[in-house]
DNA sequence: TGTTAGCACTCTAACGAGTCGAGTGCTAAC
DNA sequence: GTTAGCACTCGACTCGTTAGAGTGCTAACA
C-alpha cells in the first residue's frame, strides 16, 4: 500500500492535532479540519490503512489514534525538508532571538548556562548544552610558576584557550633557573602536540633531557601529564529539567526519575553529545524519536540535538529533551536560530 | 498539660512506627509494642492529649495519627541529645565509613562529587555538598604570563589554593620587562589582601604607580579585579535527587518539580548553605523540619545539614533533603561520621 | 469505484451505591 | 487509673451503571 497524497495529509493532520491536544484523535475531528472535506467515514477507512502501515496506533478499540514513532519520523522528516527550503527566510528571522542571549558573556561558563536557560525557557522542554571541545586537543602553552618554596602552579592552555590548572607539591625546593629550564623544556617539547600523542616514550625522553634534575622534573611532568589527561569528561550544563513535569506522559514516577537521574549524573547526556558530534558532519540538527534515542532510558522521549562551532574544529552540542509529542516545528526553528546565533557570535570573537 | 514520661514513650513509639511505615498509626498498633503494656483504649486517651498538645495530627476522624512538625522536632532533639552522650562510641565507629570515600581523591571536584554520591547512596535521600570556601578570601599569588603577542593569561591563587584564570586580550603587544614589572606590582600590592578590600582607590593607586604603561596596566587590573570578584557564587554538587521519587509524599508533580528545580538551579541550595554556615559555630549538625526550612518550597521536606572544615576558616556544607518522615537516626549518624571523616582527611593533608 | 450515511458495537472514564475495615470517642465496669 | 465494649466515622475499594466518544461494517449513492 502506498502513502498517497491524501493519506499524507490525513497523517499530518492527525499528528498536528495530537501534538496540540495530547489526546488520541478521532475521525470526526479530522473530518472537520479545513481543506480536506472528507466525511469521517472516509477518514476512518484511511486511518485503518495508516494503522496497517504502522504510522499511527490505536490505544484501544474505541479510542482515537496516536502517532507511532514511525509517524513522528515521517512528520519530522517532512518538517526538516521544509526548513531546508525556507533557509533564506529563516536567516532573516535570526535576529529575533538575539535578545535571548546575553549581550556580553564575559565567561564561557556563564554563557553556556544562559544558553541552556534560554533554550529551556523558549521551548518548555528540558535543555542541555555541552561545552565546546576540540576534536583534537592541542597544547598551546604551558607555564610553571613558583607559588611557595615547594609548591608550583602549572597553567596549561590548550587550543581554543581552555585553561587547566594544577598545583604541584615538590619534595625539595626548586630554584629559579631550574624552573626556567623546565618551562623551556616543556614548551619546546610539547607545544602544538595533540594530547593523545603524549605518550610514555615522549615523557621518558623529556626526563632524559632534563638530566640532573630528573627527580623534580619527573614529578612535575607526571603532574602535568595527568592534569592534561584527567579532564576527559566533558562539561554539560542543563536547565529546565523540571519542564518534564508539564507532560503527563513523562511525569509519572518511574519515567521522571530516570530522566532526572540522567540530568543529574550527566553520564547519559554525555553519550548523547558524543553520538551527536559523531554525526555532526551530516546535518545540522538531529532528531531522535523514542526508540531511536542513543540512550535506552529515554525511549519515551524525543531528543533533538544540534552542534555549534566555536572555531575550526571546536564543536559543542545543544539539545532538548521532551515528550515524543513535541512541538517539533518550534523546536527545530529555535535550535536552528540558536546555533546560527552561537556560530556568528563566536566567529566575531 | 505536661508531657510526662508515658506520653513521651507513646509519642516516640508513634513517630518511630510512622517513620517505618509512612502510614498513619493507630492506637492498637502502639498497644502491641513491647515495653508499654497498655491497652489500646488507654493509648487512645493519651493520643487525644498529644493531639491537643500539638505533637501529632489526625488526618481525618477515623484515621490513625501522624507526627506534626512539633512532634518531629521533639524526636530530633531527643535524638541529638542521645548522640551527644554517645560521642565517644561514635568516634570509634568512625572508620566504618572510611571505605565510603575514595582512597586518593586527586582533585577536589572529584572528591566532592564522590562525597555527595556516597551520602545519597547511604541515606537514600537527595544529597548535596558545597565546595569549601573561605570566610575571608585572601589573595595569595598572581602571575601574568604572555601566551601570544597580545594575549596574557592571569593566574590568580587565593588562600586555600583555589585557582582562577583569566585570559586578557590587550590592544598593543607587551614586552617582557613590562610584564615583569606588572607581576611585581600586582603581587606586592595585592598579596594577602582580602578580596573584599580591593576597592577603587587601591586600583587607581596601582594605576598611578604603573605610570607610563597605565593603559595596558589598567586593562590588566580591570580584568584581574573582575575575575576575582566574578566567582562569588559557591559551587554545589548534588547527587541522588531522584531519591525523592521513593517517597510518595514528595513524588507528586508539584512538589517533585519544586525540589528538582532547586537541585538544578542551585539557588535555593546556596541559601541553605549560607544559612548553615552562619550557624556553624553553634552546633555540628542542623535539622530543619518542614516549615523551619530556610527556603520556602521545601516546607514538605526535612533538611539536615552539617559543616566540615578543610582548614582554619575554610568551611563547606554537606546536606541531605528528604521527606519529613526521615530516618533521622541514620541520617544524623551518617552525617556525623562523614564530617568527621572529611575533617580528619583534610587535617592530614 | 470511491464516498458517505447510518447503525450496532466497543471501550473508557465518571459516577454512585454499597461494603469493609481500621480507627476513634465515649461510657460503664473493674 | 485502666480497660472492655460498642456505636460511629470515614476513607479505600468494589461493582454495576451510564454517557460518550469513536470505531468497523454495511448498504446506498453518485
Image: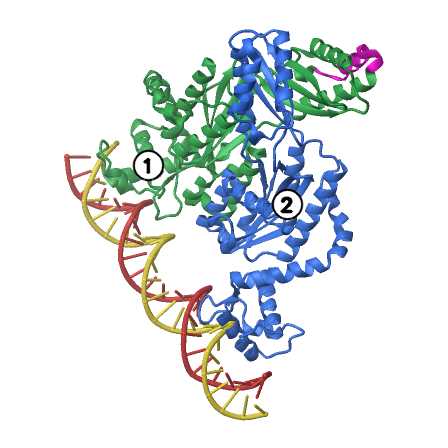
Chain colours: A green, B blue, C yellow, D red
- Say if residue A278 shows up in the picture: no
Chain ID, mark 1: A
Q: Residue at x 64, y 20 (%)?
A: B187
Q: Residue at x 59, y 79 (%)?
A: B39
Q: Residues within 10 Å of mark 2 (few under 14, many from 20)?
A: many
Nearer the camera: disc 1 or disc 2: 2
**Magenta stretch contains residue A209:** yes
Q: Residue at x 36, y 42 (%)?
A: A22
Which residue is tagged 2? B307
Point out residue B142 in the picture as x, y percentages from the top left corner.
63, 21
Q: Residues within 10 Å of mark 1 (few under 14, many from 20)?
A: many
**Image-quadrant location for residue A104:** top left
Point out residue B81 in the picture as x, y percentages from the top left corner.
66, 60
Q: Residue at x 50, y 46 (%)?
A: B259
- Left or right relative to B162: residue B87: right
Q: Is residue A238 above or below residue B95?
A: above
- Say if residue A38 shows up in the picture: yes
**Image-quadrant location for residue A190:** top right
Secondary structure under the numbered disc 1 in the rendered image: helix
- Left or right relative to B81: residue A269: left
Instruction: Report the disc number at residue A257.
Output: none
Magenta-drawn segment:
A198-213
Q: Are marks 1 and 2 in contact (CB under 8 Å)?
A: no
Point out residue B192 in the picture as x, y percentages from the top left corner.
65, 28
**Magenta stretch contains residue A279:** no
**How far apart are the two marked residues, 1 and 2, measured between alpha carbons?**
57 Å
Q: Is residue B262 above or below residue A212?
A: below
**Image-quadrant location for residue B99:** top right
Which residue is tagged 1? A14
Secondary structure under the numbered disc 2 in the rendered image: strand
Amino acid at each position: 500500500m502506498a502513502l498517497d497524497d491524501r493519506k499524507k495529509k490525513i497523517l499530518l493532520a492527525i499528528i498536528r492535532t495530537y501534538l496540540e491536544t495530547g489526546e488520541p484523535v478521532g475521525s470526526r475531528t479530522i473530518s472537520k479540519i479545513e481543506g480536506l472535506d472528507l466525511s469521517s467515514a472516509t477518514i476512518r477507512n484511511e486511518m485503518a490503512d495508516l494503522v496497517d502501515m504502522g504510522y499511527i496506533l490505536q490505544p484501544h478499540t474505541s479510542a482515537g489514534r496516536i502517532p507511532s514513532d514511525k509517524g513522528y519520523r515521517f512528520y519530522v522528516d517532512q518538517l526538516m525538508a521544509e526548513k531546508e527550503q525556507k533557509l533564506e527566510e529563516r536567516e532573516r528571522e535570526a535576529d529575533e532571538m538575539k535578545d535571548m542571549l546575553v549581550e556580553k558573556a564575559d565567561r564561557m561558563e556563564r554563557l553556556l548556562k544562559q544558553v541552556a536557560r534560554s533554550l529551556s525557557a523558549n521551548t518548555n522542554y528540558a535543555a542541555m548544552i555541552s561545552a565546546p571541545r576540540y576534536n583534537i586537543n592541542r597544547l598551546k602553552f604551558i607555564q610553571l610558576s613558583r607559588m611557595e618554596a615547594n609548591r608550583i602552579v602549572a597553567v596549561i592552555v590548550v587550543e581554543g584557550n581552555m585553561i587547566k590548572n594544577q598545583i604541584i607539591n615538590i619534595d625539595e625546593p626548586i630554584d629559579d633557573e631550574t624552573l626556567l629550564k623546565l618551562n623551556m623544556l616543556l614548551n619546546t617539547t610539547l607545544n602544538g602536540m595533540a594530547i593523545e600523542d603524549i605518550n610514555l616514550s615522549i615523557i621518558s625522553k623529556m626526563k632524559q633531557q632534563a638530566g640532573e634534575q630528573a627527580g623534580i622534573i619527573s614529578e612535575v611532568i607526571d603532574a602535568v601529564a595527568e592534569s592534561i589527561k584527567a579532564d576527559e569528561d566533558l562539561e554539560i550544563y542543563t536547565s529546565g529539567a523540571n519542564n518534564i513535569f508539564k507532560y503527563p506522559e513523562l511525569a509519572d514516577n518511574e519515567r521522571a526519575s530516570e530522566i532526572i537521574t540522567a540530568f543529574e549524573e550527566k553520564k547519559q547526556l554525555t553519550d548523547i553529545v558524543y553520538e551527536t558530534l559523531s554525526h555532526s558532519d551530516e546535518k545540522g540538527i538531529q532528531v531522535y524519536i523514542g526508540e531511536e534515542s542513543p540512550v535506552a532510558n529515554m525511549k519515551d522521549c524525543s531528543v533533538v540535538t544540534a552542534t555549534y562551532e566555536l572555531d575550526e574544529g571546536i564543536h559543542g552540542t545543544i539539545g532538548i529533551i521532551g515528550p515524543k509529542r513535541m512541538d517539533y516545528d518550534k523546536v527545530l526553528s529555535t535550535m536552528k536560530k540558536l546555533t546560527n546565533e552561537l556560530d556568528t557570535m563566536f566567529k566575531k570573537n
